[in-house]
Image (tube, rainbow, N blue to C red):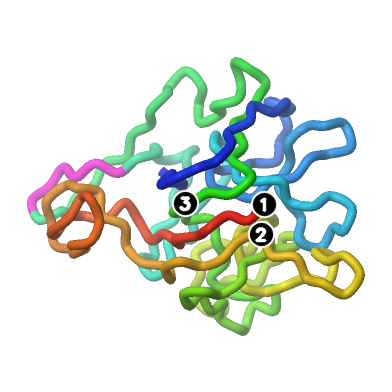
Amino acid sequence: MALIEVFHVTASSLPIDANNSVDIPQGLLVSLEGTGDVQPAHGDNATQLPIGIAGDTRSTGVTSFTPESGSARSRNPKTSYEGALVTGAWGASQRFTENRVSDGYNEVLASGKMTVYHSGGEFWTDQYEVVQSSGSVLATYASGTALFASGAETAGGAPLGEPEDARSGRFTDEASTANSTTSTIIPVGVTLTAPTSYPSGVPGTETAFQSLPEGGNSLAWGTFLHVKLLV
């Protein structure tokens, strides 16, 4: 699970090359190629601005998708499976599984289309950068912080312990001049809640969300950023 939809305005079904080798995890910001196909958003590309959030996953099954900030867990669909199930006492043992075995993590394979949420909404997503593009500055996500699409992929995460390198199309607090018209920087979202463990509803002690419908103490789906979408 990489995206939790709290509220959305529009969910479009847009064409995508299902066999393209570039992975697009659910919850990533996306844009359109010149051909009209969905692609990861590039924060440093002024001609192809972000249009929304990916609601499906296109995967080659060779890379992990989530920074899982603070948990040191990085999923790799090729060697494991998608969702974590607790199989041991106290949550000490977990087994990974996937929802649709036939698709092999490529949820756009059958239709050649991807669900894209746009025109506003409220989401929890684990597709955000832990560090800025420099690789030495932690990203800061306080409530009300403007959010932008990350730029080209760089190998900058390791120095601060991020399990994965930077990925184009993730939410970040780092504005790029390419995301602008004239002198106005255009954000894609606003932070509602800083990255935090999101409760799964399975009884446990990792999270204590009294204000969410799940309520009480439970094991976590992972670490998610709570965003208001502006695009």
Q: What is the spatial separation of the Cα atoms under label 3 and label 1, in whole angstroms?
A: 13 Å
Q: Is residue 107 above or below residue 202?
A: above
Residue at image mark 2: 188
Quarter-wise, where is residue 148 in the image?
Answer: bottom right
Q: What is the spatial separation of the Cα atoms under label 3 and label 2, in whole angstroms?
A: 13 Å
Residue at image mark 1: 231
Instruction: Kindly indicate whether the residue at mark 2 contacts the one at mark 3 (C-beta within 8 angstroms).
Output: no
Residue at disc 3, secondary structure: strand
Q: Position of residue 221 (x, y in %)?
A: 31, 51
The magenta stretch is 84-89
Residue at disc 2, secondary structure: loop
Quarter-wise, where is residue 36 in the image?
Answer: top right
Instruction: Kindly indicate whether the residue at mark 1 contacts the one at mark 2 (C-beta within 8 angstroms).
Output: yes
Quarter-wise, where is residue 128 in the image?
Answer: bottom right
Specify the farthest residue to the left: 89
Q: Position of residue 117 (x, y in %)?
A: 59, 40
Quarter of the image with the N terminus is top left
Q: Position of residue 174 (x, y in %)?
A: 67, 74
